[in-house]
Amino acid sequence: MNEQNGQKNDKQATTNLTMAAIASQVGVVTIVIIFGALILGLVLDRYFDTKPLFTLLLLVFSMPVTVYLMIKIVKGATDRIKPIIKQKESKDNLEGGNSL
């Protein structure tokens, strides 16, 4: 009984760590894109002497890019996780470790 609970806890811990890794990856990508757009906009505004124009445009256009990349990262990660979870579940079913 304890072995089954241990396996469930290990699965849950692995799932939690994977989700945390995905969330942190999405967060880093978001910050990099937005700060990149901000810095590039400020540089272009200074170069062309158009105070807020490029900064605002690049920040506004960085939002959909960020959302697109978030979706792509999460979808890619879940597509990679699904086969691993199915393999573990089928292995547990064969071993009889998934019975309550």
Image (cartoon, grey):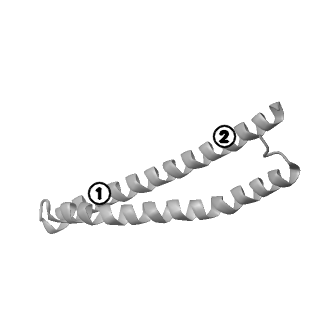
Measured Cα–Cα span from mark 1 to mark 2: 38 Å
Looking at the rendered structure, which numbered label has been put on residue 13? 2
Q: Residue placed at 12% from the left, 60% from the top?
A: 51
Circle 1: element type: helix
Vertical placement of residue 9 versus 41, above or below: above
The reply to whether discs 1 and 2 touch (Cβ–Cβ < 8 Å) is no
Q: Tell me the crowding category of disc 1: few under 14, some 14 to 19, or many 20 or more residues within 10 angstroms, Cα based.
A: some
Q: Tell me: 61 left or right of 75.
A: left
Figure quadrant of residue 70: bottom left
Q: Tell me: 41 left or right of 14.
A: left
Q: The C terminus appears in which quarter of the rendering?
A: top right
- Whichever of callouts 1 and 2 sits on the residue coming sooner in the sequence is 2
* Residue 58 point in image, percent of width and height: 25, 64
Instruction: Count numbered badges in the picture.
Output: 2
Figure quadrant of residue 80: bottom right
Q: Residue placed at 67% from the left, 45% from the top?
A: 14
* Residue 20 point in image, percent of width and height: 55, 45
Q: Tell me the crowding category of disc 2: few under 14, some 14 to 19, or many 20 or more residues within 10 angstroms, Cα based.
A: few
Q: Nearer the viewer, residue 79 or 50?
A: 79
Q: Tell me: 64 left or right of 10.
A: left
Circle 2: element type: helix
Q: Which residue is identified by label 1?
A: 39
Identified by mark 2, the residue type is Ala
Q: Residue placed at 22% from the left, 58% from the top?
A: 42
